[in-house]
Image (cartoon, rainbow, N blue to C red):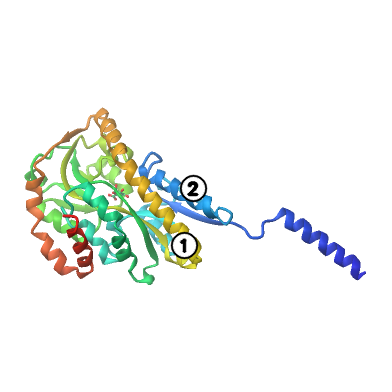
Amino acid sequence: MKLCRLIILSVMLFLFGLTAPAYAKITVTVAHTHVETHPQHKAFLVFKNYIENEIGDRYEIQIYPNGLAGSNEQVFSLVKLNSIQFMAISASLLENSSKQYAIFSVPYLFRSEEIYELFIRDPEVIAELQAQEKRKFFRPLSAFTAGTRNFYASFPIRTVDDLKDRNFRVQIGRNTGLMMEAFGANDYVMSFKDVYPALKKGVVDGAENNELALVDQRHGEICKYYSYDGHQMIPDMLIGSEEFLSSLSPEDYAVFQAAAMEAQRVEIREWKSRVKKAIKQAEEMGVSFIKVDSESFRKKVLHLHNSLLSDNPAIRKLYVITLKYQ
Ligand code: GCU
């Protein structure tokens, strides 16, 4: 009888061993709000492939683009709860949780996109951002460029005075509010996904973003004038759930971190060519691109630098790092 049981047990173990894996794969969810031609989507595909090539026996990465998983604000809450593990989120939306991110909304902080890209790739910068407290429930792994933010509207903006008393959608954040006040314009804070309906209904006269928003978010259907004043360069941070990241072994964590760096490299590489294409597509939609005297816009807000730095000590260390690139 005992022998019979032993044989049955051995047969079951043998069959189980053949049919089921030793452990189930962990599904890792990634969400973002952009369309599939956006450099960030390409970067997340690289992120996925890198991880699955290295440790795909244990992790499967699922990407939800196009805001399928919800707005940036909703997904951010889910990342903090570890219901979604990774997302790309504008540094502006992180300012309330961690004051260091306000460095990016300081207007005219970088002299060129090249300098800004060097800054966001600088290991000292990501290390400083990662040094935030663990109880923020998220951790940045790298930063994606989101180009330069410029004003666009249903009317042409040729000088700073053209902004006066007009209503613009902006991202949340004290620095941005003060910048708009210095420009003499009214700021309307709203979620990225709400900008198109707000433009369409005339709730706002315009918005400010990179060129891709004209095409990918269809803002160019309403706003036919895009002016190169270049007031901010704000990255989208690739962040992960703190609960998920701190549950990883050091070896697996190193793979996720390396994948994020590789994703950043590809995203920055793709950015310029995608912008060129978007400009062409926007022109076909009837959008005119206006070169303005950006120096006159800059002069209007430059006095803010000192007060922004003294009011928020959390950005000082990062500000000092920007100086090595000036
Ligand atoms: C950029 C960025 C988005 C962000 C958006 C915004 O386009 O890539 O992720 O949410 O600006 O203005 O809200």
Label 1, ligand 1: CB separation under 8 Å: no
Residue bearing the label numbered 2: 49
Q: Is residue 252 left or right of residue 89?
A: right
In the image shown, does 287 or 280 lie closer to the viewer?
Answer: 280
In this picture, residue 55 sits left or right of residue 87: right
On screen, residue 102 above or below 56: below
Question: What amino acid is at disc 1?
Answer: Tyr
Question: What SS does tag 1 mark?
Answer: helix
The answer to whether any part of residue 204 appears in the image is: no
Say which residue appears at 25% left-offset and 40% top-offset.
211
Image spot of residue 214 (x, y percent) = 27, 38
Which residue does the image show at 32% across and 38% down from the upper left?
274
Mark 1 lies on residue: 253
Using the rendered view, name the quadrant where residue 276 is placed: top left
Q: What amino acid is labelled 2 in the image?
A: Asn
Image location (x, y in percent) of residue 67 = 40, 48
